[in-house]
Image: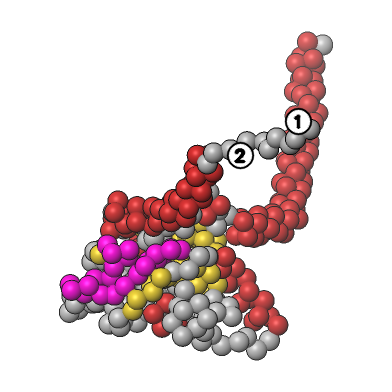
Amino acid sequence: MRSEAEGAAPEEKEPVDSADETADDSDDSGKGKRKKRKQGSFWKELPILIVVAVVLALVIKTFAVQAFYIPSGSMENTLQVGDRVLVNKIVYHTRDIARGDVIVFNGLDSWDPEIEVDEPGNPVSKALRAVGTAFGVAPNEKDYIKRVIGIPGDHIKCCDAQGRVMVNGVPLDENSYLFTDPVTHERNKPSNDPFDVTVKPGQLWVMGDHRELSYDSRSHRGDPGGGTIPTDRVIGRAFVIVWPLNRMDTLPIPDTFKQKSLAAAVPATPYALGAIGALPFAYIQRRRRRAPKPHPTKHAP
């Protein structure tokens, strides 16, 4: 009996081993099904994720930051053809447009296009062009990028005895950003054409850094604005180059625009004019206070 029990022992273990194998097989099949479900759910969620990403990008582009493609050489060497810049669309809600800012503005109905872009011939191409323009990978012939030289109230003149642009009588040292030929190392003159303008309220005088190539305020002096552009057409301030990677850089305001005499020239003018205009009223009020008051006339009873 003992030998039979010993012989039966291994036979009793076989069903247990078989059950374990069955359990392992069921676990493997369960894991496989879960993997399939995960892969299937990922592909189902992918279109939703793409739509959400596009919507968020469009919201950011509309209200905060937008990418722009540089189509011409009017801002060389600062910006090259094909560069992509990010434009801050919020900054001018917190501060005024400043001299030296590189701005993007819409020239529709005020300036002729600086470049000619062929109109897409079919709806698909138009849609792709619209998407490319929105994300800064295609040019937009209605938008310009220039540097602000004069803000409302500025008197801008070119040139002084040394050939420099004058803003409110203060000469600008523009050597840090004016176009320099990479071969000959010759730098553009501040302007080949003389001009003398006073920027009206709500307007800006803008110029490209490549002065010999830029079609800027100097070239539009015959337009209704006298070459200036409306401040309400400014889209935002270009603050960084993001593409190509080897040209990534910020776009700060050059030091020449931080001169105290330049900054103080215009803000002092309105206050001075206001003080001068108030003098006659102050004089009249003072005379009235000093004038003797008439005594009441006594009538006979």
Image depth: mark 2 or mark 1 in front: 2
**x, y percent for residue 236:** 52, 61
Q: Is residue 59 left or right of residue 15?
A: left
Cβ–Cβ under 8 Å for marks 2 and 1: no
Helix, strand or loop for disc 1: helix
Q: Is residue 35 above or below residue 17?
A: below
Q: Residues within 10 Å of mark 1 (few under 14, many from 20)?
A: few
Question: Quick one: which residue is furthest to the top in this view?
Answer: 2
Question: Quick one: which residue is furthest to the front in this view?
Answer: 301
Q: Residue at x 47, y 48 (%)?
A: 283
Q: Residue at x 27, y 62 (%)?
A: 170
Q: Is residue 169 magenta?
A: yes
Q: Which residues are magenta?
A: 148-170
Badge 2 or badge 1: first in the primary sequence: 1
Q: Is residue 60 above or below residue 3?
A: below
Query: Disc 1 designates what residue?
Result: 20
Q: Residues within 10 Å of mark 2 (few under 14, many from 20)?
A: few
Q: Residue at x 57, y 65 (%)?
A: 232
Q: Quadrant of the C terminus?
A: top right
Q: Amino acid at mark 2?
A: Pro
**x, y percent for residue 21:** 74, 34
Is any atom of residue 19 visible in this view? Answer: yes
Q: Residue at x 52, y 41 (%)?
A: 291
Q: Nearer the viewer, residue 226 or 31?
A: 226
Query: Disc 2 designates what residue?
Result: 294
What label does residue 147 carry, if any? none
